Image: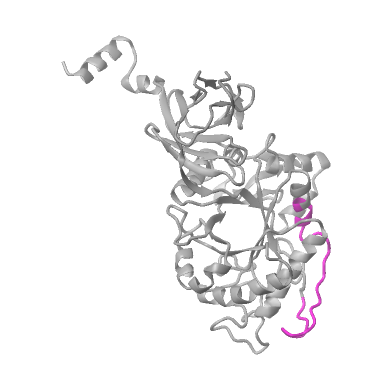
Amino acid sequence: MHPTALLSSLLLLGGASASELQSRQASTITVDLSRTFQTMDGFGTSEAFQRAVTMKRLSEDQQRKFLDLMFSTTKGAGLSILRNGIGSSVDMRDDWMVSIQPRNPGGPSATPNYVWDGSDNGQVWVSQEAVKTYGLKTIYANAWSAPGYMKTNNNDANGGSLCGVSGASCSSGDWKQAFANYLVQYIKFYQQEGVEVTHLGFLNEPDYTTSYASMRSSGTQAQDFIRVLRPTLDRNNMTHVIINCCDTMGWSVMNSMLNEMRSVEGSLGVVTGHAYTSGPSSPLSTRHKTWMTEAADNNGAWTSSWHSNGGAGEGLTWANNIYGAIVNGNVSAYLYWIGGQDRPSTTNSKMIRVVNKQVEPSKRLWAFANWSRFVRPGAVRVSTSGAPSNVRTSAFRNVDGTIAVQVINNNSGSARTISVNIGTTGAGSSFVAAADGVAAWVTDGSRDCDQIVATLDASGRTLSASVPPRSMVSFVLRPGGGAKN
């Protein structure tokens, strides 16, 4: 009898199917620390378009719960990047972002007339809390549009281009320098509030025209402005501020823009794109870091489900989305659209909603937690091998020496034992479990980044735990002198 047939017969005699036996068998994931990929900047979200204002209206205890869910590495997602919207609107109507210079000062060469309310559409509050309470270090300030009077259509909405870039002449003159000054002043206002803007973007979805703040741009036009923006930042002692570009509606569109921007690529720091019309399934053609800066399920009805039918808003879906962007797209940061909001939106556009003035997180947030809590800024992705069928794995070496390994089990059925082995090459000393023997965290249908016990073998290099079906488990080990179970 063929060995496979013999095995099948034995399984049937034992009352177990072949698939059931496979699910019970242990699988070993090998981590190769000598083979490295991108360095991570983190994970994040935004409270733009007055979402921050609405969250600040909550009671103090619910404010704190919201902030903990966003930024705490023990109570929430542990996000490390906040993306703020730079306003361009004349007034603060619902869902708009007011400008720091809402009225034309009299032309591009006129003395600016900036105004500052210390709130910036509620974003100052979130930024200060994130920085001072939770230690967040990356603030990405992003303009959806220049003020309307600086554009060809005299409106901050409905597209139009910045006056003075190629193919965009205006009777009012060339506004490139005035817009650069405007962005610098925005950063200065945040400095006086005790918040340092680290990354600056001047475009959002330049390939998309819509009824809210939006501005069109080609790569050539973006290049024209970068030639003005970089020197303006440098003259104002902002050499540390990194220019991001260009937050295109789809990831692949960014390659087309890059081909028109090669002469200023040295002035860029991070290349950015969104995942609405195409996601980051492969790396962009640039030597710079790349960030996926916006994605969401804006259409599906609100769900808090981890897995039901593989829907676009489910937590397991987002765990896999993040995996694909990092491992296949080589991104160094992944941001969801909105963190929290209390307005009566019934879509999955946010990770946290408010019901009867109470904060309610979705499983999308906990998917981020299983990544962001353990893959910290500065972590370097390293190679993994040996994943069983329909199981996705990745691994990172953090700045503090800890090794974080992600296991996404997309299989249904029974739990299976997964072992993570830290290969000897480039590993240095042996490892110990990261938290007094508790070295794995799981998110699934009933748990939200909860700790589970994992076992470290005598070598101090192999950590094992039971990984439930349709779950994400994060293993963590830290350098040490010996085994610790």
Q: Residue furthest bottom?
A: 171
Name the quadrant of the C terminus.
Answer: top right
Give the vertical position of 343 relative to 200 (above or below).
above
Side of 48 relative to 256 (left or right): right
Rendering coords of residue 227 (x, y %): 60, 76
Give the vertical position of 461 relative to 274 (above or below).
above
Q: Residue furthest left?
A: 1
Q: Does the magenta segment cover residue 116?
A: yes
Find the magenta span and give its range: 103-127
Type of secondary structure dominating the magenta stretch: loop
Rendering coords of residue 174 (x, y %): 65, 85
**Quadrant of the image occupied by residue 7:** top left
Name the quadrant of the N terminus.
Answer: top left
Rendering coords of residue 318 (x, y %): 52, 43
Give the vertical position of 434 relative to 55 (above or below).
above
Residue at x-position 53% and y-position 57%: 289
Q: Does the magenta segment cover residue 60?
A: no
Residue 98 in sight = no
Side of 227 relative to 102 (left or right): left
**Quadrant of the image occupied by residue 192:** bottom right
Residue at x-position 82% and y-position 42%: 59
141 or 101, nearer to the observer: 141
473 or 405, nearer to the observer: 405
Side of 75 relative to 463 (left or right): right
Rendering coords of residue 10 (x, y %): 27, 12
Residue 48 in sight = yes
Coloring scheme used:
one colour
Residue at x-position 67% and y-position 81%: 175
373 or 265, nearer to the observer: 265
